[in-house]
Image: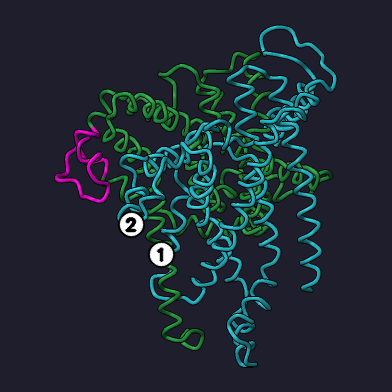
Amino acid sequence: MGPALLIFLAVIIVPISMSIYYSFFQWNGVSAKVFNGFGNFNQLFQDPILWTSLKNSVYLTLGALFIQLPVGLFLAIVLGYKLRGSNFLKTIYFTPVMLSTAVLGILWGQIYDPNFGLLNNLLIQLGLDQWAHAWLGDEATALGSVIAVVAWQFIGFYIIVYFGALQGISDEVLEAARVEGAGEWKIIFSIQIPLIWPTITFTVLNCVINSLKYFDLIYIMTGGGPNNSSEVLASYMMKNAFRMMDFGYGSTISTFLLLFGLCLALIISKVLGRTGARFE
Amino acid sequence: MSTRASLAGKGILRLFLLLQAVFVVYPLVWNVLASFKTNAEVMESPWKLPTSINWDNYIQAFSTAKIGDYMVNSVIIVLLSMAVLLFAAVPSAYVLGRMKFRGRGFISQFYMAGLFIGGVYIIVPLFIFMNDMHMLDNRFWLSAVYATGSLPFSVYLLTGFMKSIPLDYEEAAMIDGCGYFGILLRIIVPMARPGIITLIVFSFFDFWNEYVLAMTFITTDSKKTIPVGLSNLMQIQQFATDWGSLFAGLVIVLAPTILVYALLQKKLTEGMSLGGVKG
């Protein structure tokens, strides 16, 4: 107990406070820290790239919420019909969740490759030549291309989580509804979804929190580019802190990210809690 | 459940399931196929099968790209992290799951809070702290950071398992004169084995795949882990345009995880629902 708590304190709680503390300084990590008051925050709110990153982070989060969760839930419900091979498919769906994001980023970089990539080739074969282009090199499509890969990797996670939750609903409830003449859609929307609402709340929160701090794929696939068009808050923070060696400003961004995430998490749990209460 | 869906309905549902399966699997299969292709073949058409199974790309990946060295680093770091994690998490979960004392709720929640705090929020202070303590560029300290980072989830998972062990065993052992450590090692650990195995497997994936911290905290090339080494390889290969060995490198990183997953997937998904990832 003792040692675990101690290192936990040292490695999680103290650094968060330190990060907030550093955000008030001008500091490159080597020379002495210069107290800067709210100077960094002033700079933050006037930094156009910050707003681009914030907007992109929000897009990334919304993309995750509105692709991964509904598709995950849909496929989990379909798997619930216990068609032949369902168990095997479940295993397949979960596979990318277990794989290295760095490696998947490189792999998808090759799939999006303008010269020999799968995607452009597929489009050309389908006669959609005009759609083929450098997906990651184009400001208009860079972020969207990454969002698609995030979805590709994590839909399986939500399938498994929702499937597990749906299994918790007793068959008798569903049979009773059927005997009463309820249609399949009615069963899904009036029984299954309300009954797994706590799980849905958890997944929404989990998805938002993870999307906000998402970084790996952006860094590997686009590096935030081209021209900051796919920069998100986490990648912009890393860039400032470790590439430009501006630890003060980097910490300011991460403090901003933390506060933004906390507010969002609070709002979401309030709203979803209220919706959940309506079901009871 | 034939009552639940008509035959046509079933067909459509099956189609959705299949589409998702192809969507998930095809990129990975494509990667494996490309790893056997020569450069010319890679450039030619992404749909063609390799003309022959040639292992040159793999040999190339090990000999010129030093994939083997990165792999050794990854193995060392995974093992070290796991040792530190088990040493810290098992006793913690034992105390939190089985003993009643003031502040237990607080400490449990404290751990729970850690579930939501990850990498990017603390990476700057952590970097500065490790720099001051001369812990940077050191495989052991990177492992210690990994272990600590997985502590909240691990304690949460194990506490659930430990709570389910009946108290009678402990009481009987205590009457026989067994101390707390004896109980932990002889009774709790063997009985919580499914939980501990789940934990080991999950943390294997986490540690083997971790990228951001490894990239930031390790600077010497010879100490880098395989995902970081591989992204370096990508940069080098882009100049050399040796696509085949890049694909081979990707397969070399993916293969162990896919293998472990294939062997243990049943245990894993069970562990997930037992440990309450369901929320």
Q: Which residue is mark 1?
A: B19
Query: Counting other residues with Cα less than 10 Å from the Cα at mark 1, is it few (<14), some (14-19), or many (20 or more)?
Result: few
- What's the magenta region? B34-58
Q: Position of residue B98 (x, y in %)?
A: 70, 51
Distance from Cα at disc 2 to Cα at disc 1: 21 Å
Residue drawn where x is 43% and y is 62% of the image: B20
Left or right of B163 in this view: A101: left
Q: Residue furthest left?
A: B52
Q: Which mark is residue A127?
A: 2
Q: Quadrant of residue B213?
A: top right
Helix or strand or loop: what does disc 2 sit on? loop
Query: Counting other residues with Cα less than 10 Å from the Cα at mark 2, is it few (<14), some (14-19), or many (20 or more)?
Result: few
Q: Quadrant of residue A186?
A: bottom right
Magenta run includes residue B39: yes
Q: Give, as a three-letter code, the residue at label 2.
A: Gly
- Residue A18 visible? The answer is yes
Q: Nearer the viewer, residue B112 or B193?
A: B112
Q: Nearer the viewer, residue A166 or A115?
A: A115
Q: Nearer the viewer, residue B250 or A7?
A: B250
Judging by colour alone, the chain drawn in cyan in this rendered image is A
Chain B tint in image: green
Q: Position of residue A105 (x, y in %)?
A: 45, 40
Q: Main secondary structure of the magenta part?
A: loop
Left or right of B112 in this view: A162: left
Left or right of A247 in this view: B31: left
Q: Quadrant of residue A109?
A: top left
Q: Which mark is residue A50?
A: none
